[in-house]
């Protein structure tokens, strides 16, 4: 496993109370685990002085209460952690979460376009999309939006030139070399190839998000009838 001290890291302040660490390394499970580990260490070092740690593909943003700590002390502490290395790697236990998806009809409005772009049949797109176990690299854009890596090269497709105004909650999309799931209704520029009837984001639940970074996602194909039945059970 690569040490953070061996990764070129750039620190940039965002305003007067937050900074972002950018890591010059390809986004993969190794880097995601290190970013989460660094977030855990920063939470331990800064305690209540750290308001929030926001992990992303190749960066970590830290938001501070500057009434209780000076910026120079923040940078010195972070540089020391990076230089000395992290001995405790993220304790997050990776789960494999199966998400049922209907790839038919109105639930998959962009499936035919994507299949044509990728020079595949719709069945081949579905087969490719469901045979991979995806890594949750980060949550973002919307509360609980799943950014997933591991998409087969054959399914890579540029995002829409003109985003859709209404993408339903549970929509499963492909944008570039990523696939993901929309947790709530939203505009969006990814190609929607399916939809899940289960809740991705439950704001009133103790754990509002269905998955966390480092979890794995396996999409399972279901029929329209199964979709409607599961949707009723969710109501």
Image (tube, grey):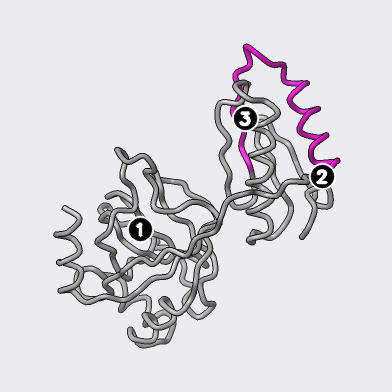
**Quarter of the image where the N terminus is located:** bottom right
**Mark 1 or 3, which is nearer the eye?**
3
**Res 233 → quadrant:** bottom left
Closer to viewer: mark 2 or mark 3: 2
Magenta segment boundaries in residue numbering: 60-85
- Position of residue 39 relative to residue 210, above or below, is above
Q: Where's residue 4, x and y in %?
A: 78, 49
Secondary structure, mark 3, is strand
Q: Circle 2 sits in a helix, a strand or a loop, which is it? A: loop
- The alpha-carbon separation of the residues under discs 2 and 3 comes to 25 Å
Label 2 Cα crowd, 10 Å radius (few <14 / some 14-19 / many 20+): some
Q: Is residue 111 magenta?
A: no
Q: Nearer the viewer, mark 1 or mark 2?
A: 2
Mark 2 or mark 3, earlier in chain: 3
According to the picture, the residue beneath numbered tag 3 turns out to be 14
Mark found first going from the N terminus, 1 or 2: 2
| Residue pointed to by mark 1 | 162
Percent x, y of residue 99: 35, 65
Secondary structure category for the residue under label 1? loop
Which x, y percent locates residue 66? 63, 16
Q: Is there CB contact under 8 Å for labels 1 and 3? A: no
Give the Cα distance between marks 1 and 2. Answer: 44 Å
On the image, the x and y values in percent for residue 195 come to: 28, 65
Q: Is residue 181 left or right of residue 12?
A: left
Q: Residues within 10 Å of mark 3 (few under 14, many from 20)?
A: few
Q: CA distance from mark 1 to mark 3?
A: 30 Å
Disc assigned to residue 85: 2
**Residue closer to the observer: 128 or 119:** 128
Question: Which residue does the image show at 33% across and 71% down from the upper left?
Answer: 193
């Amino acid at each position: 496993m690569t040490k953070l001290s061996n990764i070129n890291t750039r620190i940039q302040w965002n305003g007067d109370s937050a900074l972002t660490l950018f890591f010059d390394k390809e986004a993969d499970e190794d880097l995601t685990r290190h970013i989460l580990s660094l977030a855990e260490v920063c939470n331990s070092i800064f305690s209540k002085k750290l308001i929030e740690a926001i992990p992303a593909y190749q960066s970590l943003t830290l938001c501070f209460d500057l009434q209780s700590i000076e910026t120079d002390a923040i940078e010195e502490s972070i540089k020391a952690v990076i230089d000395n290395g992290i001995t405790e790697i993220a304790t997050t236990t990776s789960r494999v979460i199966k998400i049922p998806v209907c790839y038919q009809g109105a639930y998959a409005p962009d499936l035919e376009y994507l299949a044509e772009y990728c020079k595949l049949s719709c069945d081949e797109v579905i087969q490719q999309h469901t045979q991979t176990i995806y890594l949750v690299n980060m949550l973002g854009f919307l509360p609980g939006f799943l950014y997933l890596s591991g998409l087969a090269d054959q399914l890579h497709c540029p995002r829409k030139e003109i985003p859709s105004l209404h993408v339903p909650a549970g929509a499963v999309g492909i944008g570039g070399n990523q696939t993901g799931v929309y947790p709530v209704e939203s505009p969006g520029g990814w190609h929607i190839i399916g939809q899940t009837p289960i809740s991705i984001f439950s704001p009133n639940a103790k754990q509002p998000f269905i998955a966390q970074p480092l979890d794995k996602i396996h999409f399972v194909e279901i029929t329209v009838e199964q979709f409607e039945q599961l949707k009723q059970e969710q109501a």
